[in-house]
Amino acid sequence: MQVSGNARSVLEIVGQTFDFTVDKFKLSGPDNMATPYYGLFRSDNMACVGGGSVSDRYTPHTTQDVLALVEAASEAFDGDINVECGFYDGHYVLIQPTREYRRNIFGSRDNIFPRVRIRAGYDGKAFSASMGYYRDLCKNMHIMRSVSGTTVSIRHTHGLRSKMDDLITQFEILKNSWATLGDLVAAMSQREVALVDFLNTIYPQPDADAKANSITIHKNRTEAIVKRVLNERAQLGKPTNDITHISAWDAFNAVQGYVQHEATRKGSPDAFRRAILASNDPAVRAAELLASQALVA
């Protein structure tokens, strides 16, 4: 769900989107046998949350904790933001600052915009907020791991709102990382790679005795990625008659875009979920590392 507006209206709608609690209930064995384990369940539909049981010491975070994070991010970006929300065994919020933060990569046709992703899961890990980008040319959204300072961990403690000043400081750090991320992308756009070698590094050629299905999957995936390269270069007004060597930025986005938009996923995830899955995909992470090779100190 996407919402936008001033800080107050965004917080109201985020609160309405997550208008439920996640509660802890004791789990029983066969014939109501007592166990030391607890499970987490949504109050609105009683769906089980998380990948396993929790202990009696575990305290689930609340929507109010998530709202405190959104409020802090809003303060860091001067209060004018758009927000997209999703719940996938935890709260995910995508903060979209105004277009004034746009970075032009190739003339005025290839632009990236900052996206701050907040993750508040129920897996015992710290909350996190990461600075990523949205590329309007191909609707790709990615969290770069090659740039230091683009992710901050936020320890979940009782009453996050009481620590608002500290939270705002952490989101200010993320805001400042946008310039560094943009510099890396600009450098990637100037670095040339051999497309065949790039793809073969990410997706190695099947062995000569590989099964026919594996060969077909590799062929179809390669064709889909190459098609993305051609389409995006055509939109940018770049030559399409010879794509033997292209920019590392173009090569990376072709792989990332394929994984985000076209790769088969179980359960038919929505667009927001697909972007999250793509950012954690091993092939995308390998493509980012390869594209940024020798560009990151």
Image (cartoon, grey):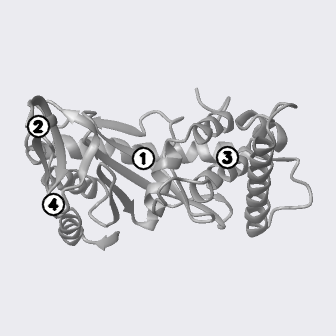
Question: Between 179 and 195, which is closer to the camera in this rendering?
Answer: 195
Between the residue at mark 1 and the residue at mark 3, the CA separation in whole angstroms equals 18 Å
Residue contact at pointers 2 and 4, CB within 8 angstroms? no
* Amino acid marked by disc 1: Met
Measured Cα–Cα span from mark 3 to mark 4: 39 Å
Q: Are marks 3 and 4 in contact (CB under 8 Å)?
A: no
Q: CA distance from mark 2 to mark 4?
A: 30 Å
- The answer to which of marks 1 and 3 sits earlier in the sequence is 1
Quadrant of residue 283 in the image?
Answer: top right
Location of residue 173 in the rendering, given as x and y in whole percent from the top left corner: 34, 41
Q: Secondary structure at mark 4?
A: loop
Q: Residue at x 34, y 52 (%)?
A: 88
Q: Position of residue 110 (x, y in %)?
A: 64, 62
> Residue 28, can we see it?
no
Give the left or right position of residue 250, taking residue 48 as reference: right
Q: Using the image, tell me which numbered label, if any, was put on residue 252.
A: 3
Q: Residue furthest front?
A: 31
Give the residue displayed 33% in from the left and 37% down from the top: 152
Q: Mark 1 or mark 3, which is nearer to you?
A: 3
Where in the figure is residue 232, as x and y percent of width and height?
73, 63
Per the rendering, the mark at residue 131 is 1
Circle 2 is placed at which residue position? 31
Q: Badge 4 is on which residue?
A: 20
The answer to which of marks 3 and 4 sits earlier in the sequence is 4
Is residue 188 shown above or below 43? Answer: above
Relative horizontal placement of residue 55, taking residue 196 as reference (left or right) = left
As drawn, 281 above or below 70 = above
* Drawn side of residue 250 relative to residue 158, left or right: right
Q: Amino acid at mark 3?
A: Phe
